[in-house]
Image (tube, helix red, strand yellow):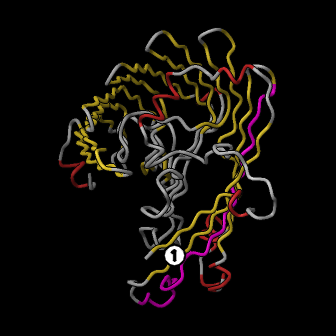
Amino acid sequence: MKAEEAMPLDEVLEGFGEEQQPAGSAPSTLDDVLQGFDETQAADTETQPLDAALHSAGGWQLSGELDFSTAYNFAHQRPAPGQTDFRGLSRLRTGLDLELEGAITPGWRLHLEVGGEYDAVYRINGRDDYRAQLLDESESEVEVGEAYLQGSPAPAFDLKLGRQILVWGKSDNLRVTDLLNPLDLREPGIVDIEDLRLPVGMAKLDYFSGDWGFSLIALPEVRFSKLPPFGSDFYQGAAPAPPERVPADGIDNMQYALAANGIFSGWDLAFYWADVYRDQGHLSANGGAPKLRHSRITMAGSAANVALGNWLLKGELAYLSGLEFSGLPGLKRDRADLLLGVEYSGFDDTTLSAERALRRLSGFNENLAAAGY
């Protein structure tokens, strides 16, 4: 059983001042996954130029959110001797997210998010009962979220530099073309989907013409998903994972992406291309101790939405090449992914969604089957 509460900072401080904020003055919090996968927001971001408000050097806004979440495990069996007992209280976490935004010059604005959290459950239950790797990655954390400079260098052009979250595709729940941002998967199925995406350092240049928006993206930061650490109740395995080889950030390992997004009356269409490191790693020995490596892949894809009254039909298609696999050195394969979905919004404050993804791996043989693929 899991229970979570989130309290915006303005609610926490309510009563300490006599003046009420005007309606709509409080900025919203981070917006990615269930609502972060919201195709409408993503489309607006990709195809609309900067708001005219950016062209006047307005004031600065500081906002924040205070979170408190707890979890209690009630169906766990007694662990074997020497293993961590995760029964009972398993999370007692407090988090604080701060967001600063403002115009630094006419036409240019700065956005900065910083978040920190502390989980008191480890001290309450006894830190000696947990593995060091779990404590290092889960007890406390301070991290820079989205942090970027955004402006218009020329008419019809927008430039965005810094750590960003860029949503591709139309799916609300499954990932087919959405591959630029890694995910925080340390607690799968528990963390709100809008908080899963991790920002990545990139430079994004947008050009707008009529109903179309075009994006040229360069990603110098190489970042992969956060997985459950050794010692976590979500970690699968009895031994620590092999060391991970993460390519160095910079020009030598630059990743690239292109996007074209058109919004029309009742439907929209997008095309994507990316040359990036694969988020899912594979074990490779290369004559030494096994290491978790990430292959360089390319992806070409497309996504579309069609609105029919209260119904929304969605589809995505992606073709990935250069995939490598654990235990099969030198083997590379291509894969085609297809997603079909439907969404119904005819109820008040309720949306129903169903999606199905199919993935077909080229050249599948007994070696891949024996390796668990």
80 lies above or below 144:
below
In the displayed structure image, the side of residue 92 where residue 299 appears, left or right: left
Q: Nearer the viewer, residue 290 or 262?
A: 262
- The image quadrant that residue 298 belongs to is top left
The image quadrant where one finds the N terminus is bottom left
369 lies above or below 94:
above
In the displayed structure image, the side of residue 194 where residue 264 appears, left or right: left
Residue at mark 1: 71
138 lies above or below 252:
below
215 lies above or below 10:
above
Q: Nearer the viewer, residue 182 or 73?
A: 73
- The image quadrant that residue 236 belongs to is bottom left
In the displayed structure image, the side of residue 190 where residue 135 appears, left or right: right
Residue 23 image point, x, y percent: 65, 45
Q: Residues within 10 Å of mark 1 (few under 14, many from 20)?
A: some
Residue 82 image point, x, y percent: 51, 87
Residue 200 image point, x, y percent: 60, 39
In the displayed structure image, the side of residue 161 where residue 246 appears, left or right: left
Q: Residue at x 75, y 62 (%)?
A: 13
Q: Is residue 189 visible?
A: yes
* Residue 96 included in the magenta stretch of the image: yes
| SS for callout 1 | strand
Residue 182 image point, x, y percent: 51, 45
- Assign the magenta stretch its main secondary structure: strand
Q: Is residue 337 visible?
A: no
Amino acid type shown at disc 1 = Ala
Q: Residue at x 81, y 22 (%)?
A: 105
* Residue 74 included in the magenta stretch of the image: no
Please state the extent of the stretch shown in magenta in the rendering: 78-104
Total labels drawn: 1
Q: Residue at x 28, y 45 (%)?
A: 346
